Image (cartoon, grey):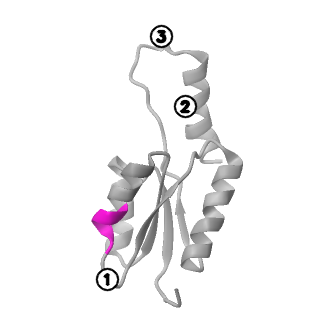
Amino acid sequence: MGTSKKVALVTGAAQGIGFKIAERLFNDGFNVAIVDFNEEGAKKAAEALSKEDQEAVAFRADVSDRENVFDVTRKVVEHFGELNVVVNNAGLGPTTPIHTVTPEQFNQVIGVNVGGVF
């Protein structure tokens, strides 16, 4: 891109706290990679932020998948030319009674909330 703007990658940035973090970084002058499992949501979030001289770009990733995280990070750097800030925000919080949580749900939450940050 040939720009001097700093670049931030924010996971779980399609909505909620992640979007607000991305929005704050964008408003502070960063180009922002909106990374989320929900590709459509990430695209909508990026569209809400982009302006003529600054970019917010959507990338799909499953943060519980180590290789997927490495791959999306490479794509972000290829697109923007650098990476200055990473915010590992993605997280899941099932609101079901604990006795109804299945092993699959448990593994998904641990994969995203612990593995994704690691």
Query: Are dots 3 and 1 in contact, CB under 8 Å?
Result: no
Q: Nearer the viewer, mark 1 or mark 2?
A: 1
Q: CA distance from mark 3 to mark 2?
A: 14 Å
Q: CA distance from mark 1 to mark 2?
A: 38 Å
Report the front residue among 79 and 5. 79
Earlier-in-chain disc, 1 versus 2: 1
Please provide percent x and percent y for residue 52: 31, 82
Say left or right for 54 vs 105: left
| Residue hosting label 3 | 100
Residue interval drawn in magenta: 46-50
At horizontal 45% and vertical 50% (from top left) the residue drawn is: 39
* Kind of residue at disc 3: Thr
* Kind of residue at disc 2: Val
| Residue hosting label 1 | 52
At horizontal 61% and vertical 17% (from top left) the residue drawn is: 103
Q: Can you tell which quarter of the image residue 110 is in?
A: top right
* Kind of residue at disc 1: Glu
Please check the rendered image and state whether residue 84 is part of the magenta-colored stretch, yes or no.
no
Name the outermost residue toward the right.
67
The mark found on residue 79 in the picture is none
Say left or right for 98 vs 19: right
The mark found on residue 109 in the picture is 2
Please provide percent x and percent y for residue 117: 60, 48
Earlier-in-chain disc, 3 versus 2: 3
Earlier-in-chain disc, 3 versus 1: 1
Report the front residue among 45 and 83. 45
Say left or right for 83 vs 55: right
Please provide percent x and percent y for residue 118: 66, 47
Mark 1 lies on a secondary structure that is loop
Magenta stretch, main secondary structure class: helix
Q: Nearer the viewer, mark 3 or mark 1?
A: 1
Mark 2 lies on a secondary structure that is helix
